[in-house]
């Protein structure tokens, strides 16, 4: 059976030409706001530079950068008094917010965008739909840069008088209460947290990077830099620092060893493309997860949009276990399997590196009568949660997790007769996961918009073609909007339907599967 799948993989490699989009974002790539160059530069892990997007110098001078959870890139654009939004495929530059003199921007865990307004001395808060409120201010006329701690507190650098020792870092609670955190700085610029909760500050005037422990203890992480301006942490713990006016991006290892990573024409804000769901090979594009019910083997088919470009076998599952979802449970930037045993009601997480099993842990056992049907981050803590379903009552529930550990739960909405949850994605762009529903009797699809575990609205999606079932949803065309994945088990044919929220905008056939293999995710 493995030989059959290998032959199919080779056939697709030989006869299917994959589209190539040089501007597409990919996890692990570093992005740099090009300021008056009117470009955003992209660097792969080797430091090779390309142009992600470019615009008119009079209306597009990107500086500070931030990615949302969908992979959309946001850029402060003071030349046009806007915050620009760019989808993962780099196809458009649109105005997300207007009427602002934007400085640094940062996302909180709930997907709200915070932006410093240099004109009013305020920090504005924008919901994912663009609704604006004032978080703090006006009157804070020396705010420079921001970073969110894992507890939701916002840390902000203040320029002070611009002289040695007059700069500071302040902390704002989620309610906007301010308190001092650190002082005695000289032209402080960017801030960034490492994975251990230590805060790093680019002290431009002294040419240093200072490190602050959670209790505020200050040490010098790196000295002798050329006016450090901007920061971005890679997933391996390396800190990337933008220097000005030398226009170098310097890489500093966790032990403090530094080297020049790249020397672009201009250095603005820095940001790394975040990992994406269902992207096993970390190329920024969603992949298929396959399962063989005869051998219990899993496999991953790597795609470029709807086009097959390669594949690899994944781990074989034990008897009675099935993969019900894919998410990054251990927060290493790589998708993992969420497993469920319908006989014992036990759950488990299998941690993966691409297609390779690297470890596992049992998750919570479900009560009798409940099944695990999907995963998603419903409480906006950056950690995937379980979606449960009780067929007898049609009730859903959310179990909040920290990796594999249960930390709480809430009931979700009850489904109508003949409907089931087949996936989770943010269809209406509010930064919150929604239920994707399918009625196999009528072939109708539906989207239930949620806020946490609460139903706030719904819409019918396109109905399936006869013979096709709805498998799940992911953003295959990299426009920042989830798409449907369809499967015809009789023909072993797959397809992708491109959506704008609940509206069908186009479709394409995906690769056909070998005998005995089925598509289980996304």
Image: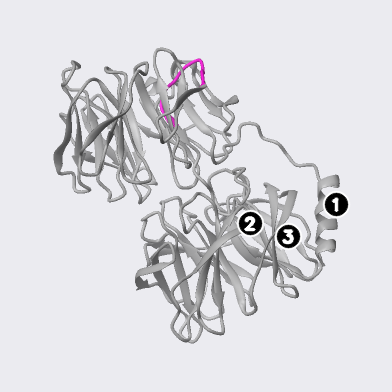
Circle 2 is placed at which residue position?
356
Q: Position of residue 240 (x, y in %)?
A: 44, 30
Between the residue at mark 1 and the residue at mark 2, the CA separation in whole angstroms equals 23 Å
* Residue located 65% across and 78% down the image: 319
- Which callout, 1 or 3, points to the residue nearer the camera? 1
Q: Is residue 9 visible?
A: yes
Determine the main secondary structure of the stretch shown in magenta.
loop
Q: Within the magenta stretch, is there residue 332?
A: no
User: Is residue 146 depicted above or below 41 in this figure?
Assistant: below
Q: Which residues are magenta?
A: 262-270
- Count of numbered circles on the image: 3
Q: Which of the numbered marks, if any, corresponds to residue 494? A: 3
Q: Within the magenta stretch, is there residue 264?
A: yes
Determine whether the residue tagged by mark 1 lies in a helix, strand or loop: helix
Q: Which of the 4 image quadrants contains residue 121?
A: top left
Q: Which of the numbered marks, if any, corresponds to residue 11? A: 1
* Residue located 45% across and 85% down the image: 393
Q: Position of residue 34 (x, y in %)?
A: 47, 21
Q: Earlier in the sequence, mark 3 or mark 2?
A: 2
User: Is residue 170 depicted above or below 430 in this figure?
Assistant: above
Count residues near mark 3 (Cα–Cα under 10 Å), then give few for <14, some for 14-19, many for 20+: many
User: Is residue 397 depicted above or below 158 in this figure?
Assistant: below
Count residues near mark 1 (Cα–Cα under 10 Å), then give few for <14, some for 14-19, many for 20+: few
* Residue located 35% across and 38% down the image: 106
């Amino acid at each position: 059976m493995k030989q059959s799948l290998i032959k199919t993989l080779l056939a697709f490699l030989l006869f299917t030409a994959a589209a190539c989009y040089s501007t597409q974002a990919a996890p692990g790539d570093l992005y740099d706001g090009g300021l008056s160059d009117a470009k955003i530069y992209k660097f792969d892990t080797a430091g090779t530079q390309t142009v992600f997007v470019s615009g008119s110098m009079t209306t597009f001078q990107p500086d500070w950068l931030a990615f949302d959870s969908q992979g959309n890139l946001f850029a402060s654009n003071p030349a046009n008094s806007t915050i620009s939004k760019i989808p993962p495929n780099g196809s458009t530059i649109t105005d997300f917010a207007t009427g602002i003199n934007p400085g640094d921007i940062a996302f909180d865990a709930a997907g709200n965008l915070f932006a410093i307004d240099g004109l009013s001395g305020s920090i504005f808060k924008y919901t994912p739909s663009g609704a604006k409120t004032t978080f703090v201010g006006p009157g804070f006329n020396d705010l420079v840069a921001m970073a969110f701690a894992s507890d939701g507190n916002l840390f902000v650098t203040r320029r002070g008088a611009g002289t040695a020792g007059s700069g500071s870092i302040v902390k704002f609670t989620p309610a906007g209460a301010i308190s001092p955190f650190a002082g005695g700085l000289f032209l402080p610029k960017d801030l960034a947290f490492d994975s251990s909760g230590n805060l790093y500050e680019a002290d431009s005037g002294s040419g240093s990077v200072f490190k602050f422990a959670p209790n505020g203890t200050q040490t010098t992480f790196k000295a002798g830099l050329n006016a450090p301006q901007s920061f971005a942490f890679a997933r391996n713990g390396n800190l990337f620092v933008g220097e000005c006016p030398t226009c170098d991006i310097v890489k500093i290892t966790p032990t403090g060893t530094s080297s020049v990573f790249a020397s672009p024409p201009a250095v603005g804000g820095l940001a790394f493309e975040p990992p994406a769901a269902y992207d096993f090979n970390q190329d920024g594009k969603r992949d298929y997860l396959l399962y063989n019910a005869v051998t219990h083997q899993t496999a991953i088919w790597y795609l470029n949009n709807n086009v097959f470009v390669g594949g690899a076998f994944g781990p074989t599952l034990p008897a009675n276990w099935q993969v019900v979802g894919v998410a990054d449970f251990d927060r290493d930037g790589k998708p993992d399997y969420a497993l469920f045993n319908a006989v014992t009601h036990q759950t488990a997480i299998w941690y993966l590196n691409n297609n390779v099993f690297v470890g596992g842990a049992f998750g919570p056992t479900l009560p009798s009568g409940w099944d695990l049907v999907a995963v998603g981050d419903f409480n906006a803590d950056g950690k995937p949660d379980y979606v449960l379903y009780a067929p007898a009552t049609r009730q859903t529930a959310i179990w909040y997790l920290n990796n594999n550990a249960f930390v709480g739960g809430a009931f979700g909405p009850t489904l109508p007769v003949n409907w089931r949850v087949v996936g989770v994605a943010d269809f209406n762009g509010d930064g919150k996961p929604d239920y994707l529903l399918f009625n196999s009797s009528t072939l109708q699809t539906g989207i239930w918009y949620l806020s946490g575990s609460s139903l706030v609205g719904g819409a019918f999606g396109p109905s399936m073609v006869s013979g096709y079932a709805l498998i799940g949803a992911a953003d295959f065309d990299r426009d920042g909007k989830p798409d449907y994945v369809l499967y015809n088990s009789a023909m072993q044919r797959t397809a992708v339907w491109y959506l704008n929220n609940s509206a069908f905008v186009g479709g394409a056939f995906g690769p056909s599967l070998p005998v005995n293999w089925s598509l289980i995710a996304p």
